[in-house]
Amino acid sequence: MSDAAINTDLSGDMLAILGGTFDPVHIGHLQPVSEASKELGLEQVRLLPCHIPPHKQMPHSSPEHRLAMLELACKQWPLFVVDSRELKWNKPSYSVDTLRDFRTEFGNHLPLVFFIGMDSLCNLDSWHEWQSLFEYCHLVVCQRGDILPDFNVNIARLVSERQTDDPGALKHKACGLIYLAKTSLVPVSSTAIRTALNQGDINPAWLPAGVLDYIQQHQLYQKRA
Ligand code: ATP
């Protein structure tokens, strides 16, 4: 369990996290965040698998399988480590609760970057206590999809109030800013991967190699006879 590999010496540093269902983890999770991390000067990003996703149906794979696949992905992508705290809580994984837990652990002064994809930003006003998120973190948003984002009134106002074009600004405040990173488009989703696996038609480039081997070995996401 790579929680042990998490860098706990964060003096003068930033904490960075990407939450998700990771059912399974794929290149679309890793590549854009990796690009944005270079721009922000981040040395480590925690991948936080959720236990009970508040916005979707329950994951198809068990927490143990999703965790094992994340561990394999981290071996190939050393920027990332797994943080399994949400899996230890038997309740819906509301990001605001997780962020409060990080603040209890690390205090209120460390800059905390919370990565999301553009699709998640567009729906942010459906998240539990969404306006409170900014008391705890900055949002760094990775591009997703090939159309311009369609912000509703709440999100358009939020972005106009909190957006910065200077990634360096995130180091000088603990929370409260939004940075729209110019990351590559990686047109892949866990849903598309599950469908492709089910149809026996997977593009291996969508997954870290170890993850595809693991899926095949454990016969995950495959049509039951
Ligand atoms: P599903 O297809 O099952 O809904 P997903 O592929 O969207 O899953 P999640 O684990 O739910 O993956 O996503 C976690 C986070 O990663 C979200 O903020 C999401 O926007 C972001 N993300 C996922 N895939 C991409 C991608 N291809 N490009 C950019 N961001 C992504």
Image: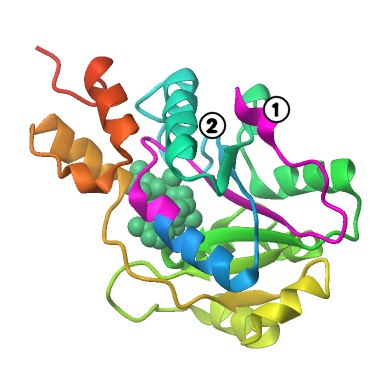
Residue assigned mark 1: 4
Q: Earlier in the sequence, mark 2 or mark 1?
A: 1
Task: Please name which of the two marks, 2 or 1, marks the residue nearer to the observer.
Answer: 1
Q: Quadrant of residue 215?
A: top left
Judge left or right: residue 160 versus residue 195. right
| Residue drawn at 47 percent across, 35 percent down | 75
Q: Quadrant of the N terminus?
A: top right
In the rendered image, residue 142, in percent from the top left (x then y), is placed at 47, 67
**Residue 52 numbered tag:** 2
| Residue drawn at 59 percent across, 55 percent down | 127
Q: Quadrant of residue 112?
A: bottom right
Whether residue 63 is situated above or below residue 178 in the rendered picture = above
Amino acid carrying label 1: it is: Ala
Task: Point out the stretch of residues depicted in magenta.
Answer: 1-30
Q: Quadrant of the C terminus?
A: top left
In the rendered image, residue 115, in percent from the top left (x then y), is placed at 57, 59
Q: 19 or 78, which lies in front? A: 78
Whether residue 39 is situated above or below residue 48 in the rendered picture = below
| Residue drawn at 18 percent across, 23 percent down | 222
User: Is residue 14 located in the magenta-colored stretch of the structure?
Assistant: yes
Neighbor class of circle 2 (other Cα within 10 Å; few <14, some 14-19, many 20+) is many
User: Is residue 117 located in the magenta-colored stretch of the structure?
Assistant: no
| Residue drawn at 13 percent across, 22 percent down | 223
Label 1: which secondary element = helix
Q: 122 or 107, which lies in front? A: 107
Judge left or right: residue 177 versus residue 70. right
In the rendered image, residue 111, in percent from the top left (x then y), is placed at 79, 63
